[in-house]
C-alpha cells in the first residue's frame, strides 16, 4: 500500500522523518508531525532533486513512497549515520512537504528559511561520486589498517569535479547553506 499524507501541516508544524531500518534493499522511516516551537532536533537536508523519475522505493510508516535515485542514496547514507548523529530526525523537502497539496506546499515553502535556520545542522548531499580507478585500486581491501597514501594524487581535478556538481547551480543553495547553524 502506498503512503498517504494525513491532513495538511499548519504553519507552526513540521513533518519529520525518523530512520528505523536501513539496509541495501530497504529504507524505513516513521513520520512525525511536530510543532516548530517544540525545538525538535533535526537536520535539514540540502540536495538536488535530479531529472530522473521517482523510481526508488522507501517506506514511510510501513507504506511505500517513491523517491528519485539521488534522494534514495542521500537517505541511505544519512539514515546509516543516524545512530551516532546529534539529530533525531531528518527534514527533506520532497517528503516532509506534501508536494501534491498546493496549499501545504506553498505555505511550507514560505517557511523554508525558518526550517533551515531552526535545524541543528544542514547536511549537504552532493550526490554519489564514482571513485576514479587509480584511487579505487589504492584502497585497502578488508578492514582498514593503514592510511591510504595520497602522494601524487591530483587534488585539482577532484576540486574541479566537486565544484561542477549540479548542486551548486541551484538558487536555493544560498538560503539552505547560509541559514543553517552548523
Image (cartoon, helix red, strand yellow):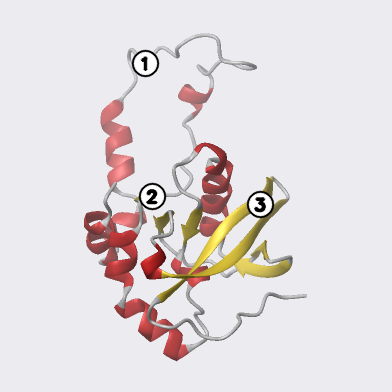
Characterize the local packing of mark 2: few (<14), some (14-19) or many (20 or more) Cα atoms within 10 angstroms. Answer: some
Characterize the local packing of mark 3: few (<14), some (14-19) or many (20 or more) Cα atoms within 10 angstroms. Answer: some
Q: Earlier in the sequence, mark 3 or mark 1?
A: 3
The image shows residue 74 at horizontal and vertical percentages of: 51, 51
Q: Is residue 137 above or below residue 167?
A: above
Q: Are marks 3 and 2 in contact (CB under 8 Å)?
A: no
Q: Quadrant of residue 159?
A: top left
Task: Tell which of 162 and 83 is nearer to you.
Answer: 83
Q: Secondary structure at mark 1?
A: loop
Q: Is residue 27 above or below residue 67?
A: above
Q: Are marks 3 and 1 in contact (CB under 8 Å)?
A: no
Task: Tell which of 129 and 103 is nearer to you.
Answer: 103
- Which mark identifies residue 163? none
Q: Quadrant of residue 28?
A: bottom right
Q: Which residue is mark 1?
A: 150
Q: Which residue is mark 3?
A: 20
Q: Secondary structure at mark 2?
A: strand
Structural distance between the alpha carbons of marks 3 and 2 = 19 Å
Q: Earlier in the sequence, mark 3 or mark 2?
A: 3
The image shows residue 158 at horizontal and vertical percentages of: 33, 34
Q: Which residue is mark 2?
A: 123
Q: Secondary structure at mark 3?
A: strand
The image shows residue 152 at horizontal and vertical percentages of: 32, 15
Q: Are marks 2 and 1 in contact (CB under 8 Å)?
A: no
Side of 73 relative to 10 (left or right): right
Which residue is found at the position 50% from the left and 16% from the top? 138
Characterize the local packing of mark 1: few (<14), some (14-19) or many (20 or more) Cα atoms within 10 angstroms. Answer: few
Q: Is residue 46 above or below residue 7?
A: above
Select label 3 or label 2 by which is in front: 3
Structural distance between the alpha carbons of marks 2 and 1 = 26 Å
Amino acid at each position: 500500500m502506498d503512503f498517504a499524507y494525513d491532513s495538511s501541516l499548519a504553519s507552526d508544524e513540521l513533518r519529520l522523518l525518523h530512520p528505523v531500518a536501513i539496509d541495501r534493499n530497504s529504507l524505513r522511516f516513521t513520520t512525525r508531525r511536530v510543532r516548530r516551537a517544540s525545538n525538535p532536533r533535526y537536520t535539514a537536508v540540502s540536495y538536488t532533486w535530479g531529472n530522473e523519475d521517482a523510481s526508488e522505493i522507501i517506506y514511510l510508516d510501513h507504506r511505500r513512497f517513491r523517491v528519485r535515485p539521488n534522494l534514495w542514496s542521500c537517505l541511505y547514507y544519512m539514515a546509516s549515520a543516524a545512530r551516532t548523529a546529534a539529530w533525531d530526525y531528518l527534514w527533506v523537502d520532497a517528503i516532509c512537504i506534501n508536494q501534491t497539496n498546493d496549499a501545504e506546499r506553498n505555505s511550507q515553502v514560505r517557511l523554508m528559511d525558518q526550517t533551515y535556520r531552526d535545524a541543528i545542522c544542514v547536511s549537504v548531499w552532493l550526490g554519489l561520486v564514482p571513485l576514479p580507478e587509480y584511487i579505487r585500486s589504492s584502497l585497502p581491501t578488508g578492514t582498514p589498517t593503514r592510511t591510504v597514501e595520497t602522494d601524487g594524487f591530483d587534488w585539482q581535478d577532484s576540486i574541479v569535479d566537486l565544484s561542477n556538481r549540479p548542486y551548486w547551480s541551484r538558487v536555493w543553495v544560498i538560503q539552505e547553506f547560509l541559514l543553517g547553524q552548523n
